[in-house]
Image (cartoon, grey):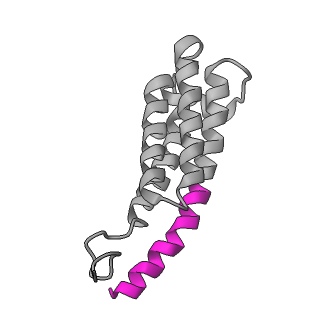
Amino acid sequence: MSTGRVASLQQRLRPACAVIGGVGAVLSVLAAFVAIDAFSLGGVFYTFDYRTGGWAGAVAFLMAIITVGGAIVVRRSPALGSTLLYIGGCGGFLACGGIWLIPGLITLVAANLALWAIRDPFADDAAGAGA
């Protein structure tokens, strides 16, 4: 693929990453509220066993905030956004278990797409290459 087509693909991936990451972030916040026993959602959130209360809920809420930050930042900086989405998705699953499965998978899909949206630093047209 030519450089112009790759740059175009990278620019088109950024909004998709933000939308998918936003959906994952909203579901992560809902899962965090369930993990801290704030309310009950029922349905698909209770497919697998999970941990609630205390430290698990606090860490889950922190991971949800990190996921929201990654979804916000991913359009401006795909590398930072992808890192935050990975931390939030994996950390939330480790903190509270099965309740984070669906939000975590959606978040990790957004993180992988964000990796594809990162510009190649070794490309010939990179900033500073002509200096």
Viewer-side residue, 41 vs 52: 52
Viewer-side residue, 88 vs 31: 88
- What residue lies at 33% left-to-right and 76% top-to-bottom? 126
Question: Toward which corner of the image does residue 5 lie, by quadrant?
Answer: bottom left
Residue 109 vertical position relative to residue 13 in the rendered view, above or below: above
Residue 120 vertical position relative to residue 65 in the rendered view, above or below: below
User: Residue furthest toward the top?
Assistant: 54
Question: Toward which corner of the image does residue 41 lie, by quadrant?
Answer: top right
Q: Quadrant of the N terminus?
A: bottom left
- The question of residue 6 being in magenta is answered with yes
* x then y, percent, for residue 93: 46, 31
Main secondary structure of the magenta stretch: helix
Viewer-side residue, 52 vs 1: 1
- The question of residue 53 being in magenta is answered with no
* x then y, percent, for residue 104: 50, 41
Side (left or right) of 96 relative to 65: left
Residue 127 vertical position relative to residue 30 in the rendered view, above or below: below
- What residue lies at 32% left-to-right and 82% top-to-bottom? 125
- What residue lies at 43% left-to-right and 79% top-to-bottom? 7
- What residue lies at 50% left-to-right and 74% top-to-bottom? 11
* x then y, percent, for residue 98: 50, 29
Q: Quadrant of the C terminus?
A: bottom left
Side (left or right) of 115 relative to 102: left
Side (left or right) of 60 relative to 42: left
Side (left or right) of 30 relative to 49: right
Q: What is the total number of numbered labels drawn onto the structure image?
A: 0
Residue 52 vertical position relative to residue 19 in the rendered view, above or below: above
* x then y, percent, for residue 99: 55, 30
Question: Toward which corner of the image does residue 33 lie, by quadrant?
Answer: top right
Q: Which region is colored magenta?
A: 1-21
